[in-house]
Image (cartoon, grey):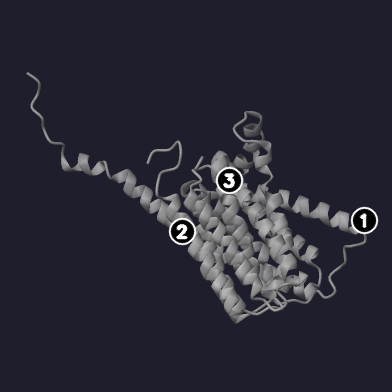
Amino acid sequence: MPPAHRSRPPEDRSREHTAPAEHGRVVTLAALATLVGGALLSVQSQLNGQLSLSWGAPTDAALWSFSSGLVVLTALLLAVPGARRALLSLPGAVRRGELRWWQCLGGFAGAAYVAVQTYAVPLAGVAVFTIAVVGGQTGNSLLVDRLGLSPAGHRPVTVGRLLAAAVAVVGVAVAVSGQHGGTGPSVILPAVLAFVVGACTTVQQATNGQVNATSGSSVATGWLNFATGLCFLVVVALVRLVTAALHSPADLSAPWWAWLGGVLGVPFIVISAVVVQYLGMLLYTLVMLTGQLATAVALDLVAPTGTQRIGIQVVVGVVITLLAAYAAAWAAQRRPPAGRPG
C-alpha cells in the first residue's frame, strides 16, 4: 500500500515563502537606493551647473567632474583587490562573448550627460533640465526593455506604457513653456539637448548593469564608466581646442561645494549598476526620476542656479511627469517580463 499522506512540517511549508519574501525585500531596498541615487543626480546637476557658471567654461567643468570622480574610483580600486581582479577580467569576458565590446562604453553617454548638464543648468535651471532628461529616459527605457539591453532581460511594451511615455513628453513641453522666454533658444536648446542625453543615459545604465553583472564589482563598473567618459571628454576638448572654441576658465573661484559634482557621480554610478538588475530598466528609471524631480524642484526653489525661476507650469510639468511615471510602472507590473516567471 502507498504510504499514508503526511502533512509537511511547518518549517517546510514556510520555506516556500522565503524566496518571494526575500525578493520583495531586495526590490524594496533597490528602490530606496534608486530614490537616493536620483536625488544625488539632481544635486550633482546643481554643483556642476554652479561650477560652470563660476568658471564660464562648461567643457572645463565637465572635465573636472569626470576626472575628480575617476580619482576617487581609482583610490577605491587600489584599496579593493577584488575590484581590480574584476576590472582585469572584463577583456576576457569580451573575448569569450560574455560581454559585448560596446557594452563597455557606457561612460560615453555619461560624459555627454555631464557636458550638457554644465551647459544647460545655468541657462534653464535644475528643474527644467531634469524634467527634460526624465522625458528622454522614460521614452527610451521602453526601447531598452524591449531589446533586453539590461540584465533584467526582455520586457514587453504595452499600450499603457506607450501612453505613459507620451504623457511624460507632454510634461516636458508644459514645463518648458512656463519658462520666461520659453520659445527662445536659451530654454529650448538646453531642454532638447537634455532630452537627448536623457535617452542616452538609459542605455548607459542598462549597459553598466550588464558590466556589473559580468564583473561582479560595482567599483570596477564605475571605474570603467568614468575612464571611458573622461576619454570622450578629452577628445571633445581637443576638437574644441583645434577649432579655437575651447576657452580657459575666466575665474577659478567657486564655492567649495561646487567642486564635488564628480564625487557625487560615483555613488550614483555604483547604485545604478547594482539595482537595475533587480528592478528592470523602466521601473528603475521611474523610481530614479521621482528622486530627481522632487530634489530638482527643491533646489531651484531654495538655491536657484539658472536664469529661470520655478513657475506654475514647471510644477504642473513635474506633476504630469510623475503621474506618467507611476502609470508606466503600474502598466509594467500588470504582467511579468517576457521570458521570465511571473
Identify the mark at residue 144; answer none if there is no mark: 3
Rendered residue at 64%/32% (across/down): 92
Q: Between disc 2 and disc 3, whose residue precedes?
A: 3
> Which element carries disc 3, helix, strand or loop?
helix
Q: Residue at x 49, y 49 (%)?
A: 159
Q: Residue at x 73, y 58 (%)?
A: 67
Q: Are marks 2 and 1 in contact (CB under 8 Å)?
A: no
Q: Position of residue 200 (x, y in %)?
A: 66, 52
> Which residue corresponds to mark 1?
242
| Quarter location, residue 188 | bottom right
Q: Neighbour class for label 1 at 10 Å: few (<14), some, many (≥20)?
A: few
What label does residue 327 carry, if any? 2
Amino acid type of disc 1?
Val
Q: Crowding near pointer 3: few (<14 within 10 Å), some, many (20+)?
A: many
Q: Are marks 3 and 1 in contact (CB under 8 Å)?
A: no
The amino acid sitting under disc 3 is: Val
